Image (tube, grey):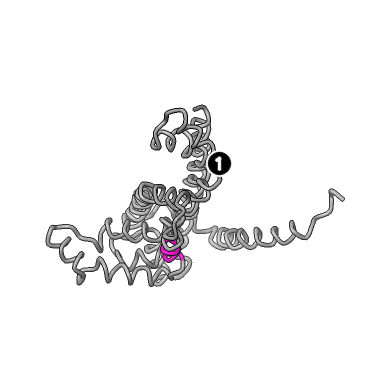
């Protein structure tokens, strides 16, 4: 019967409820805190700006580096592909704190790279650069994997046809492959941005200052409990939702523009 709920819908519905119930619980629990949002200090405002700017930059960098890598993984037929794909998955398997630790051993003040950078006046930790380095390490696999899925879905016969008509490999990539895989890339960018906005472990290890929103939430929580961290938590939640909606709409527009080629 059409009106009956299937077991699949029931199971999926339980998971959806589990996603959204804690959010509603937080909203209703801290509803009396809304009136004090206008009294936010400069530290919170700075955390918002820091999170937004570093997350956006990290997604851009991850796309610039990750999309070419995804294309290689999708089209390469050698055994090297499997090894590279294994490496791509590693940051996803590491706990965020461990990711921060391994980055510190490579880029921290006591490392060779960190010391060389510091002698040149570039701080790789306790800076915006440190935040971006941590975020790119954590979020770039989402870009690579999603873009690879998008490239895998493109029929290679279309690429061969384009090449047979005199188009170069680069022209074929821009005019055929990239437009047809754009949905996967946009999905990866959305996941990556959301992950960057919420990243705490690797970020706090690389840069306690300047504080991102998750770091500010943690500081507020350990100094005053959930009530003290409520405002920042709601701002992070709402801002992430808004940005994801905007990215989704932008993806549809870009997909529509590419479809006209």
Q: Position of residue 19 (x, y in %)?
A: 60, 60
Residue 241 in magenta? Answer: no
Depth check, front residue: 213 or 4:
4
244 or 24, nearer to the observer:
244
Answer whether residue 87 is magenta in the image: yes
Most foreground residue, 129 or 67: 67
Q: Which residues are magenta?
A: 86-92
As helix, strand or loop, the secondary structure at mark 1 comes to: loop
Q: Residue furthest front?
A: 164
The residue most toward the left is: 119
Q: Residue furthest right?
A: 1
Q: Is residue 19 left or right of residue 105?
A: right
Q: Which residue is mark 1?
A: 155
| Residue depicted at 49% across the width and 44% down the height | 186
| Residue at point 69%, 62% (across, down) | 14
Q: Quadrant of residue 174?
A: top left
Q: Position of residue 200 (x, y in %)?
A: 40, 64
**Residue 175 sits in quarter:** top left
Q: Is 34 left, or right, of 136 in this rendering?
A: right
Question: Quarter-wise, where is residue 21 in the image?
Answer: bottom right
Left or right, residue 184 beside residue 3: left
The answer to whether residue 31 is visible is yes
Q: Main secondary structure of the magenta part?
A: helix
Count neighbours of disc 1 (C-alpha within 10 A) and say few if under 14, some if 14 to 19, many if 20 or more.
Answer: few
User: Where residue 207 appears, x then y in whole percent?
Assistant: 29, 64
Rendered location of residue 107, percent (x, y): 25, 65
Can the viewer see residue 235 in this picture? no
């Amino acid at each position: 019967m059409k009106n009956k709920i299937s077991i699949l819908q029931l199971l999926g519905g339980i998971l959806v409820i589990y996603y959204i119930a804690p959010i509603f619980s937080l909203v209703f629990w801290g509803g009396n805190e809304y009136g004090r949002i206008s009294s936010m200090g400069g530290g919170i405002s700075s955390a918002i700006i820091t999170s937004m700017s570093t997350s956006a930059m990290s997604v851009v960098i991850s796309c610039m580096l990750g999309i070419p890598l995804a294309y290689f993984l999708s089209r390469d037929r050698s055994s090297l592909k499997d090894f590279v794909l294994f490496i791509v998955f590693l940051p996803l398997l590491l706990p965020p704190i461990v990711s921060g630790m391994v980055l510190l051993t490579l880029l921290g003040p006591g490392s060779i790279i960190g010391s060389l950078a510091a002698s040149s006046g570039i701080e790789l930790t306790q800076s915006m650069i440190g935040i971006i380095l941590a975020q790119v390490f954590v979020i770039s696999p989402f870009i690579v994997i999603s873009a690879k899925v998008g490239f895998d879905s493109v029929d290679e016969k279309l690429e061969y046809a384009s090449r047979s008509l005199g188009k170069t490999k680069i022209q074929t990539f821009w005019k055929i492959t990239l437009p047809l895989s754009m949905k996967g890339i946009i999905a990866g960018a959305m996941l990556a941005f959301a992950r960057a906005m919420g990243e705490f472990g690797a970020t706090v290890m690389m840069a306690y200052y300047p504080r991102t929103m998750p770091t500010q939430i943690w500081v507020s929580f350990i100094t005053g409990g959930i009530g003290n961290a409520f405002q920042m938590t709601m701002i992070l939640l709402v801002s992430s939702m808004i940005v994801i909606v905007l990215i989704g709409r932008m993806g549809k527009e870009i997909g529509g523009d590419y479809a006209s080629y």
